[in-house]
Amino acid sequence: MTGDDLPRRARQVLGVLAARHDRVQSKDALADAVWGVDLPGNATAALEHYVSVLRRALQPGVPTARSFIVTRAGGYVFATDRARLDLAELRAAAKVAERRPGQLDVRERIVELAPELPFVEDEYADWAAPARAEVKAVLVAALLDLAEPAAAADPARALRLAREATELEPFTERGYRLAMVAGAALGRADEVVRWFDLCRRALADDLGIAPSADTTSLRDRLLAELNTAAARPVESAPNGDRRRGGDRRKADRRAAVPTGPATSDAGESGAAEPVERRLAVVREAGGEAGREHSREAGGETGRQAAGGSADATGFATGFVGRRGELAALRDGPGVVHVVGPAGAGKSALLGRLRDEAPERVGLGRGPGPGGALRLGWLRTALHQLGRPADRTLDAAMHERRTLHPAELDAIAAELGGCVVAVDDAEHLDADSVSELRWLRERGVRVVVSYRYPSAIADRPLHALDADLVLRLDPLGERDLPVDVLQASGGIPALVAATGGATGGAAGGATGRAAGGAAGGDPAIAEAVAMHLARQRTRWMPPAAWEILRLTAALGTLRVEQLAAAGGLDLDEVLAAVDRLVHAHLLVEGPGGSVRHRSDLIRSAVAAQISAAHGHHLRDRLATA
């Protein structure tokens, strides 16, 4: 029997008990974890039914008194003395590893016990997230502890272990440093450069910081040593398959390190590094136009009200803002990347671009993580532009091949001066990216959207070099009335959810979550806000969500107050605050204080905190 043979709720009950093994879970606590706000009226009876299903399915013929799901004190407990549980073994091994720093066999056992992070099906559930974060931290530490001694004795294995660690936790500089050392031990200056560049991009794109001085000096020292040892041309190793996230960590740890030549994408200056072609990046914060670096961006960068009617306050009731971005997309350089977190308005911005120039812009959609018909994005764009090529596309799909150069040339000839835009392009395959590059070389302008540059660092889309990167920041006071700005924090998806913009999405909001149908309904608006907060924190450590809860319950707090109220380490708080500010969920104030950017998100998160818990937090803060 597999988990898929069990009812969905039964799997969740088993998951909660496993995550909290050897601890009695009251029926009320179990029901809250499984159903949350959707708690049925007969929750206790339903829970008892699913426990009975689990016992019969997983231990057929075993009496209830001997089941590993033990009834105790009016609740249930997963008893690991009656059934083996990998999570329990891993936690025990982690304690041993902590006491014995040099014992490598314990770390090998940890890696063996965690081929992927647990509870994939419910990874964002409140009961699953802490266990997943715990396993990830233990696994990353074990991988790096194994990689360190292997760097000299078996550098190929050390490189694989370091790669897996950085896939799980892309912000651990130790992993990148070990990969650089292993690459140098293999005599590969290009690997040193590549891993330093991966570290630089991960930290810069998601945290807005640079690698530490230790990491930079290590790179310089390793490259100097390699150059001294032997002056020879450097060949670049391909990026390989570094899919981020432990749930997709399928690489065989014993596989050979790829050694085929490829063009290095390293961008830091150094003895063996090519000079990175600078990307133009337009940033606009708080509604004020600003330019970090721009090249042929075209048009103005300040936000002004776009098309749509206006109400008595002058607030545009259709699409508002983003005029600078629209000008850059319409008249800018050949390849533009549009990036921003969930709810930033990427889809609506591309939709607006299409609406304003339907004869010049074709807008398709990427396949998503589940895959789709490979050329669906191109078929849609060509039909919108009135230049279908169905016979060519059907033939390529039937034969499971990429489009031939002659076929692409014919398509490009029909698209002179047009823009092909692909929304949600993160999962485009290598063939699709090659076809986009070919079209671009034949004069077709290309626009793609995705979440963050780090999200495509190891995907084929990374090969589509950008002439301009547009980062979508929240809207500001130039675009929105004060009450809408305060409620939404300028986050476009929440602007639509407030009902502040009638007759359509506002501020480039996707409108998909809110659908523009919220119409000011507080319940729907809070549901949209909670979903967006979860989406933007899904890659963060558990401390980030706890900080959102604390600031929701207690208001503006300094970082030391957050540490005291939450029982958190100050460094842990600072790291989480950096990420929350970067994700536009918190804003900074004087004296190191932070608060929620959006009143909607604060209200939605605060609604999950009981009055008793809130009172306890206030007492703890007062006595800290």
Image (tube, helix red, strand yellow):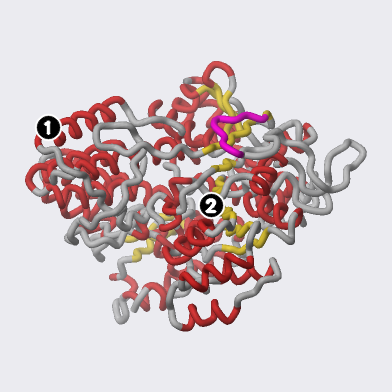
Q: Give the residue displayed 39% in from the left and 41% down from the top.
A: 202
Quarter holding residue 241: bottom left
283 versus 21 height, above or below: above
203 versus 58 height, above or below: above
Q: Position of residue 411 (x, y in %)?
A: 58, 69
Front residue of 315 and 189: 189
Q: Give the residue displayed 46% in from the left and 33% down from the top.
A: 208
Examine the structure image and report whether residue 256 is included in the region drawn in magenta: no
Q: Nearer the viewer, mark 1 or mark 2?
A: 1
Left or right for 415, reference 460: right
- Classify mark 2: helix, strand or loop: strand
Going from N to C along the chain, the mark reached first, 1 or 2, is 1
Could you tell me the amino acid type at mark 2?
Tyr
Could you tell me the amino acid type at mark 1?
Thr
Find the residue positioned furthest to the right: 312
Left or right for 475, reference 369: right
State the residue position of label 1: 228
Residue 95 seen from this side: no
Q: Position of residue 155 (x, y in %)?
A: 13, 47
- Which numbered circle lies on residue 501? none
Q: Position of residue 332 (x, y in %)?
A: 62, 44
- Which numbered circle lies on residue 450? 2
